[in-house]
Image: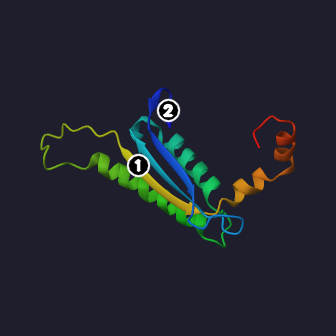
Amino acid sequence: MFYNQTQLGRLEIHGDVFYGKEERTIATRLELNWVRLLSYHHLVEFLYGLAAHVVDATPQTGEYAAATHAISAAMLKALWDSYHISRFDPAGNDLDWGELELHLRGTPKWYFLRRDCQAFAELKRAGKIAA
């Protein structure tokens, strides 16, 4: 993943062990370095956008609530670690640009609805996107 010309991290997305036609659970792992280069607004917008594509947002499943909790926890940990004073650097000269690690697991229901919609099918038929 890049921001301008700086590589910030890595995003991994993979199907769960039993992924197939019936089971559609996926897992993601996001590692971002130098998080403090990003504005809070852009970072939150990116993380919640990722969650919207990875988990089922219907309240009955609780997946989106779990994802928003995981995002908040990851952001709080990144902030805490950035301001943590190391006992090995008593002068406080160790400048930390922030690292964020986020794991999400869920059913990408919104993604599948968008992928299977009429407009997307027309784009495939027209050859404008790969099937």
Quadrant of the drawing holding the C terminus = top right
Could you classify mark 2 by the number of other residues whose Cα lies within 10 Å: few (under 14), some (14-19), or many (20 or more)? few
The tally of labels here is: 2
User: Which label was assigned to residue 122?
Assistant: none
Write the residue at 87% across / 36% down.
Answer: 126
Q: Which residue is mark 2?
A: 3
* Of the image marks 2 and 1, the number of the one nearer the N terminus: 2
Disc 1 residue crowd, few under 14, some 14–19, many 20+, Cα 10 Å: many
What residue did someone put label 1 on?
100
Nearest to the observer: residue 5 or residue 64: 5
Picture quadrant of residue 23: bottom right
Q: Position of residue 100 (x, y in %)?
A: 40, 48
Identity of the residue drawn at 77% across and 56% down: 113
Amino acid carrying label 2: it is Tyr
In the displayed structure image, the side of residue 80 where residue 124 appears, left or right: right
Which residue is depicted at the point 14% across and 50% down?
Answer: 87
**Which residue corresponds to the image point at 64% horizontal and 53% vertical from the top-left?**
53
Task: Using residue 20 as the reference point, say whether residue 31 is left or right of it.
Answer: left
Image coordinates for residue 94, horizontal then vertical, percent:
21, 39
Query: Which SS class for mark 1?
Result: strand
Circle 2/circle 1 CB separation < 8 Å: no
CA separation in Å, label 2 and label 1? 15 Å
Does residue 56 appear to the left or right of 83 in the view shown?
right
Q: Nearer the viewer, residue 120 or 23?
A: 23
Q: In the image, what residue type sits under mark 1?
A: Leu
- Answer left or right for 100 relative to 113: left
Which secondary structure lies at badge 2?
A: strand
Image coordinates of residue 13 in percent, x first then y, are: 55, 52
- The way the protein has been coloured in the rendering is rainbow
Q: Residue furthest bottom?
A: 60
